[in-house]
Amino acid sequence: MALTNTSTAAGGLGKTIGDAVIAFNHVNVMYPLVTVKQAARGSNSVQFSDWTKLTSSNVTPATQATATTAVAITSAARTATISEHVIEADVSDLVLMGSGDNVDSNAGPALGNAVAARLDDDLVELGKSFSQTECGAGTSLALSHIFGSIRQMKSAGAPAPYSLILSPKQVWGSKGIISLLHDDAVTGSNSKPMSLMGSKGEEAFQSGYVGSIAGFNVYWSDQIDEDVGSGGDAAGFAMSKGALGLGVGAEGLFRIRTERNEAARYTAYVACGFWGEIEIKDGYGVYILSDVS
């Protein structure tokens, strides 16, 4: 058992601390961007429907008062099975009594943040499974890849809004989208003023971020793998909301409980998330693997 005792929680023992600083991750990125459905009570799974797209070729000219051939409307079932995602911290009484860090109040948020990070991690991993791709291993990201992603999604009939989810290096790295929007190259021995790509270049230069580009709302997650196959490539992706599904447990997505062990003189803090994730419609997403090394 990994007990939080006076050695592991020594940072706040015997001190009065005005502000406790907890290193929270950048989390809860993916939840608003996917299709969410809660399981019915008595069920541990959620089913999503993947409808087959009908095209113009399914519509045929007809002669007046003549019967036409019916077209089948088909769909495939995509099932997300709910599972538990748990983290537990056992905190000794001596730590609770001797800490100026208010461990009792901070334990819940710290554990909850870890579970939220795991939810993001599970969902961004699905981005690797999209069969449509842009860029590729060993290739630097270009604006043409972003436009190529929206082209593929529109061709598949993916409904807006569109989301571009990238890793930190795919946004701020030397080969990321921020670097694509400005040019501060040196010509000979004389430097030249930084040139910016219109309003988006100015936005990137002023705020260090771009909220939208090429028809996408831009998001980033530090849960995205930035060293896929040890090749120095990051696993970003683009998608419509209907691409991925999140099944939530019948009693909600998340809970935190405490359990007292009087004999051992500690309190157990247990955070648990209840979800299952699934790819619903492959054509509504594009895998953007790019070199960030």
Image (tube, rainbow, N blue to C red):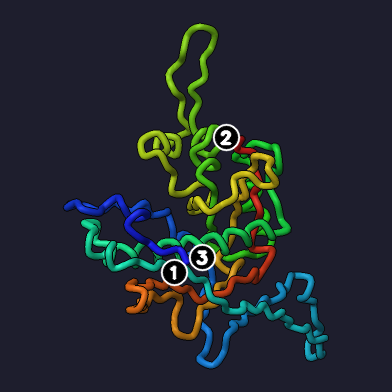
Q: Position of residue 44 (x, y in %)?
A: 57, 85
**Residue 88 got which mark?**
1
Name which residue lies at 32% across and 73% down: 265
Question: Is residue 121 among what the camera can see?
Answer: yes
Question: Is residue 218 among what the camera can see?
Answer: no
Q: Secondary structure at mark 2?
A: loop
Q: Secondary structure at mark 3?
A: helix
Quarter of the picture holding the C terminus: top right
Q: CA distance from mark 3 to mark 2?
A: 27 Å
Question: For the residues carrying marks 2 and 1, which lies nearer the camera in this image?
Answer: 1
Give the residue type at disc 3. Leu
The residue labelled by disc 2 is: 175
Q: Position of residue 32 (x, y in %)?
A: 46, 66
Name which residue lies at 60% across and 53% down: 237
Give the residue type at disc 2. Lys
Name which residue lies at 66% across and 47% down: 228
The answer to whether the residue labelled 3 contacts the one labelled 1, judged by CB atoms less than 8 Å apart, is no
